Amino acid sequence: MNDRLRRVLVAVAALFAVVSLAVSPVAAQTAAVSRAFDGHPDLNGVWQAIGTAHWDIQDHPASAGPADTGAIGAIPPGQGVVVGNEIPYQPQALEQKQQNFENRWTDDPEIKCFMPGVPRATYLPYPFRIIQGDKKIMMVYGFAEANRTIHMDKENPEQAPIDTWMGRSHGQWDGDTLVVDVHGFNGQAWFDRAGNHASYALVVRERYTPMGPNAIMYEATMEDPNTFTAPWTIRLPLYRRLEENAQVLEFKCVEYSEDLLYGHLRREPTR
């Protein structure tokens, strides 16, 4: 090896060492997971999904909205969050999904300001807050003032006393992953504006896995023998809102839905 080549190799090695020293602390800081008082990952804070899953959890092209709404009402194209992009509907349930899609501008529970259900509440285009304790974890959503409690202190999960929009949640830690089982749904919620749906028999298993101090990988697996032929999963990241004093603001949307819900009851019906 001649001297010139040796000097070049030494310079490259030195440059690589400098870059490594400069990058490593940043990478380590990015990968670090904040810890709560009990040693588990600290999920406290305001989080939000970014994407178009609230429109359609599967891959979808751009399309028109209601007449006369122009680009404001149009549906943007988006990549789906369903693993494999296929939902294993039973034939009758698939027909119901297609009917839901056709009537989405009047029948979607979101347009009526009903609670969004699980997992839909997680990827609506609004922030939500996690309040973490050792025995209970609270999820507070802005839309329709929805919320739910994850019970961490129940070794034998209790059955839901009644079926509800948000179901009953029981959680446990699997290493650094928060695992939540949700059941007791009323069967009326949709997964998105495209009409994907399930029945009251739906059971959801959620997994919240920190990817660093400001990101969580969210997974939810759906099982419902009344609607699907097999379990299926969605996966998407959640991001912490970093602006100072980030808040979850109440979206009291009922007043904007009154005509849709009750217009047919007026003396002179509006619908």
Image (spheres, rainbow, N blue to C red):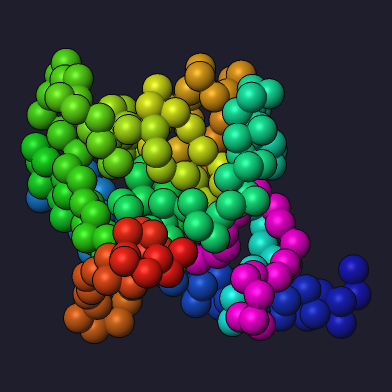
Q: Residue at x 16, y 16 (%)?
A: 156
Majority SS type along the magenta span: loop
On screen, residue 168 above or below 212: above
**Where residue 10 sits in the image (x, y, percent)?**
72, 75
Quadrant including the N terminus: bottom right
Q: Residue at x 43, y 69 (%)?
A: 270
**Where residue 134 sits in the image (x, y, percent)?**
10, 41
Q: Is residue 98 left or right of residue 211?
A: right
Q: Residue furthest right?
A: 2
On screen, residue 73 above or below 78: below
**Where residue 135 sits in the image (x, y, percent)?**
9, 37
Frontmost residue, 203 versus 26? 203
Specify start and end residues of the magenta stretch as a single range. 48-70
Frontmost residue, 250 versus 217? 250
Does 138 lie within the magenta span? no
Total marks shown come to: 0
**Where residue 117 sits in the image (x, y, percent)?**
35, 45
Q: Residue at x 56, y 54 (%)?
A: 104
Frontmost residue, 232 versus 207? 232
Residue 167 in sight in this render? yes
Q: Residue furthest front?
A: 267
Q: Is residue 204 left or right of residue 244?
A: right
Q: Residue at x 67, y 62 (%)?
A: 78
Frontmost residue, 165 versus 234? 165
Does 63 lie within the magenta span? yes
Q: Quadrant of residue 52?
A: bottom right
Residue 74 in sight in this render? no
Q: Quadrant of residue 82?
A: top right
